[in-house]
Structure formats: C-alpha cells, structure tokens
Image (cartoon, grey):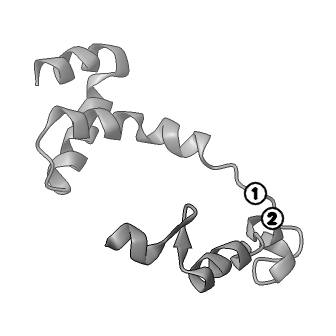
Amino acid sequence: MIQVLQIGRHVGYARLEQAITQALHFGARDTAAVLYLLSAPSLAAESSTGVPLDEGAGSPQAAAHFYRPQPSLTVYDSLLEAGSVGGHCVAEVAG
C-alpha cells in the first residue's frame, strides 16, 4: 500500500481516495486494483473509439468484415475415407 500512497503524490489524493473507495466497494483489497481504477478513466477514453456502423447495428452489412468463409474440409474427409494418416494405414500405426 506504500506504492499506492506514493502514486497519490502524482494523481492527487482526492482521486486516490476515490479509487480506494471504489476498490473496497468492489471487494478488492490489493494495490493492483487501486492502480487499475486510477488508470480506468484513461482506458475508457482510449477505448471509446469503435468500428463505425454505417448500415445500422442490426443489419448483416454492419458487421460483414467479421464474417469469414468456412474452411474446406475435403482433404480431411479424404483422409478419413482412405483410413490413412501420414501415408500409413491407421491399422498399421495402431498395431
């Protein structure tokens, strides 16, 4: 907790007290939680920018860049049908 008090010199003791109160409210009692809460406002400001949704949030076009085609499993299926793994018959490997 000495580290927290030292950081209070830089961020201000009122802000430090607020972060400690929040940490205790959340049930956290360690230095890392207080340090996180002190950096949380700056984190929220950095993450406030997002992907612009021109088409509306509910339309498929809005998140089209997240969709990927399904991988082809034809090669995998042919391995299962042939019963071979790495050029060897599965029975040979097992036996």
> Tags 1 and 2 in contact by the CB under 8 Å rule?
yes
Indicate the position of residue 11 as horizontal and vertical percent values.
36, 21
In this rendering, is residue 92 above or below 46? Answer: below
- Quadrant of the rendering where the N terminus is positioned: top left
Instruction: Give the residue at mark 2.
Output: 65
Indicate the position of residue 69 as horizontal and vertical percent values.
78, 73
User: Is residue 26 found left or right of 44 in the rendered image?
Assistant: left
What amino acid is labelled 1 in the image? Val
Indicate the position of residue 24 as horizontal and vertical percent values.
14, 49
Q: Which residue is rendered at x = 13% and y = 38% of the image? A: 30
Q: Which residue is rendered at x = 24% and y = 40% of the image? A: 33
User: Is residue 39 found left or right of 30 in the rendered image?
Assistant: right
Mark positioned earlier in the residue sequence (1 or 2): 1
Q: Residues within 10 Å of mark 1 (few under 14, many from 20)?
A: few
Along the viewing direction, whichever of 23 and 13 lies nearer the viewer: 23
User: Is residue 57 found left or right of 44 in the rendered image?
Assistant: right
The alpha-carbon separation of the residues under discs 1 and 2 comes to 10 Å
Indicate the position of residue 21 as horizontal and vertical percent values.
19, 45
Q: Quadrant of residue 66?
A: bottom right
Mark 2: secondary structure: helix
Q: Which residue is rendered at x = 50% and y = 40% of the image? A: 43
Instruction: Give the residue at mark 1.
Output: 51
Q: Quadrant of residue 83?
A: bottom right
Mark 1: secondary structure: loop
Q: Residues within 10 Å of mark 2 (few under 14, many from 20)?
A: few
- Quadrant of the rendering where the C terminus is positioned: bottom left
In the picture, the disc for residue 42 is none
The image shows a total of numbered marks equal to 2
What amino acid is labelled 2 in the image? His
Q: Which residue is rendered at x = 69% and y = 77% of the image? A: 73
